[in-house]
Amino acid sequence: MIVEFEGDVFLWDARTEAWFFVGVPAELSADIREIPRVPRGFGAVRVNVQIGTSKWRTSIFPDAQRREYVLPLKRAVRDAEGFSEGDVIRVRLEVLEV
């Protein structure tokens, strides 16, 4: 499954300024939850990601408060693509079944 969406970059904990994420829209998150897969720690789902020219493999994680998956955004990607908290970014996710 490959999906594309736009989302706001948000800071998880303002005290540390270390963890930035973008939320996967609720409808797409619901579709991803329906994909059969082997359970992983913390409910993680393996994905390939592309933002701009940056590509990498990581996991998205369920966030009970937001009721959607969230994608962690590495500093190297934020720096390379020039975005920060509050920016709207376009994300391409390939959900991996294993």
Image: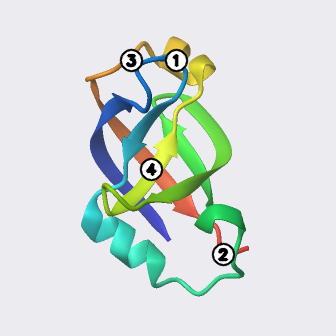
Which three-letter amino acid code belongs to the residue tagged 2?
Answer: Glu
Q: Name the image quarter holding residue 27.
A: bottom left
Point 49% across, 46% down: residue: 71
Q: What is the x, y in percent for residue 31? A: 38, 77
* Disc 4, SS: strand
Looking at the image, tell me whether mark 1 or mark 2 is earlier in sequence order: 1
Q: In this rendering, which labeled residue sits more in front, label 1 or label 3?
A: 1
Q: Tell me the number on the disc at residue 70.
A: 4
Q: Amino acid at mark 4?
A: Val
Could you classify mark 2 by the number of other residues whose Cα lies within 10 Å: few (under 14), some (14-19), or many (20 or more)? few
Question: Which amino acid lies under the numbered mark 1 shown in the image of this protein?
Answer: Thr
Query: CA–CA distance between discs 4 and 3?
Result: 17 Å
The one nearer the camera, 52 or 83, is 83
Check disc 2 and report the residue beneath it: 97
Q: Of 26 and 11, which appears nearest the observer? A: 11
Report the residue that reaches farthest toward the front: 15
* Residue at numbered disc 3: 83
State left or right for residue 6 relative to residue 49.
left
Q: How many marks?
A: 4
- Percent x, y of residue 42: 63, 63
In the image, which is nearer the foreground, mark 1 or mark 2?
Answer: 1
The residue under the point 33% across, 67% down is 28
